[in-house]
Amino acid sequence: MEETNKGSDKKNRLTLRPYLDGVKIGNKSDGKVYMVRDDRSRYFFPEEWIRFFETIKKEKQPIFDTLINTGSRIEEALNIKPEDFDWERNNLTLKVTKIKAKKGESVGRRRTFVISSQFAKRMRVYISKNRIKEGSVLFPMSKQAVSQMLKRNLKKAGFKDWYMFSLHNIRKTHGNWLNALEISPQEICMRLGHDMNTYLKHYGSANIFDRKDKVIMIKILGDAYGFK
């Protein structure tokens, strides 16, 4: 049965039809195809992340390494520059962030937070190896290119529900892992640029992860919060 996407542009009511389990597909007025997921809460379990990450070409891994280690939105990650790192304190400042117009913002608020020494080291090597100068972005690629890479490698890694993932699900994964590792909700909200209501809505129970999961999480996230 067809249904109307009420969240679509009012000028162009778009019709959705079943496509895959949990996903509907439609066509925009310009003919382009788009998908809508019923459930946007899918995130990676640690072993799933490793399986996915290992399928990515080495030279392309740093953008995904950045997303899982910072929890940044893709638009924020694509605007990171070398000077945004404080190498002495292992801090990162996201200077281009989401503008929350509903809250009266005309520019996005900068966010500074800790990163692990391991991730910082990998970024320094990446910047040096690629001769990235101050003022230049670390990842000169488009959101669409990164999104396509995500989907392609999820399929390659054997994810049957690859269509349930978007780049934003990596951000949710980061938040869920920090929650499982008992980082305070206030710290997670500050790091991700959330308010508490958003946090409660999007981040699930920490009890779904077992001890083995948490050991792998710490291996991936490093010593950012003193994890050992």
Image (spheres, rainbow, N blue to C red):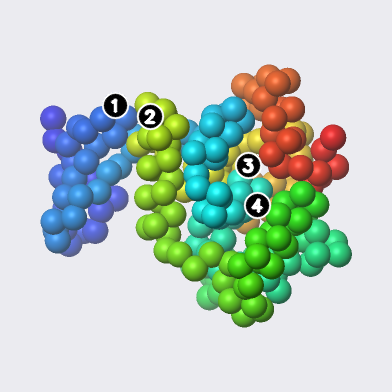
Question: For numbered disc 2, what is the local secondary structure?
Answer: loop
* CA distance separating discs 3 and 1: 26 Å
Residue 36 makes an appearance in the image: yes
Q: Which is nearer the eye, 93 or 219? A: 219
Identity of the amino acid at label 1? Asp
Q: Is residue 209 above or below residue 225?
A: above
Classed neighbour count for the residue bearing mark 2: other residues with Cα under 10 Å, few (<14), some (14–19), many (≥20): few
Q: Which residue is mark 1?
A: 21
Give left or right: position of 61 versus 164: right
Q: Is residue 11 above or below residue 174?
A: below
Q: Which residue is mark 3?
A: 175
* CA distance separating discs 4 and 2: 24 Å
Question: For numbered disc 4, what is the local secondary structure?
Answer: helix
* CA distance separating discs 4 and 3: 9 Å
State the image coordinates of residue 187 (x, y, percent, origin top left): 74, 48
Give left or right: position of 226 versus 136: right
Q: Is residue 228 above or below residue 131?
A: above
Q: Is residue 135 above or below residue 2?
A: below
Mark 4 or mark 2: whose residue is earlier in sequence: 4
Q: Which residue is mark 2?
A: 161
